[in-house]
Amino acid sequence: MTKGTMATDYDAPRKTDEESEDSIEELKNRRNDKNSGKVDEDEVEAAEAFELPGADLSHEELTVRVLPRQQNEFTCASCFLVKHRSQIAKEKNGQFYCVDCAG
Ligand SMILES: [Zn+2]
């Protein structure tokens, strides 16, 4: 019982100190927010809205970098363009040439 009272007494002033410091900063922030509060909220919301698809896109980009060519595509050995396999006009020494370069 005494312990509990002591703990409470010990914590009470500490917490009050921290809280008062926090509330002062909060008040400052709130004052700053009052000027541009609405804009900040919109920006935060926009950033959050962009974050989810952005993360997905960056993941896709990584995948594209690891696999620059699709299985149904090839890199022309002459113009080095990635083209669909249907564009292969010639194969020489394991290298493919597109219809533009073979012709
Ligand atoms: Zn080519």
Image: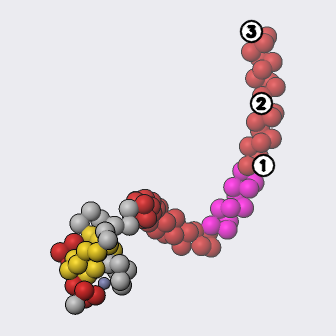
The x and y percentages for residue 12 are 77, 30
- Residue 73, given in percent of the width and then of the height, sits at 27, 70
Q: Which residue is mark 2?
A: 12
Q: Secondary structure at mark 1?
A: helix
Residue contact at pointers 1 and 2, CB within 8 angstroms:
no
Q: Relative to residue 79, is residue 27 depicted above or below?
A: above
Spatial separation of the CA atoms under disc 1 and disc 2: 14 Å
Residue labelled with disc 1: 21
In which quarter of the view is residue 6 placed?
top right
Q: What residue occupies the far top of the structure in this picture? A: 1
Q: Residues within 10 Å of mark 1 (few under 14, many from 20)?
A: few
Report the Cα–Cα distance between label 3 and label 2: 16 Å
The residue located at (79%, 10%) in the rendering is 2
Quarter that holds the N terminus: top right
Q: Give the magenta range.
A: 23-33
Residue 37 falls left or right of residue 8: left
Mark closer to the chain start, 3 or 2: 3
Asked if residue 72 is among those painted magenta in the image, a careful observer would answer no
- Measuring from the top left, give residue 19's x and y in whole percent: 74, 43
Q: Is residue 36 left or right of residue 77?
A: right
Q: Is mark 1 within 8 Å of ligand 1?
A: no
Q: Of label 3 and label 1, which has the lower sequence position?
A: 3
Q: Residue at x 28, y 79 (%)?
A: 97
Query: x, y percentage for residue 60?
Result: 39, 61
Determine the residue positioned at 82% across, 25% down.
10
Depicted 83 relative to depicted 31: above or below: below
Residue labelled with disc 3: 1
Residue closest to the eye, 81 or 37? 81
Colouring convention used in this rendered image of the protein: secondary structure
**Ligand 1 - quadrant of the structure image:** bottom left
Q: Quadrant of residue 83?
A: bottom left
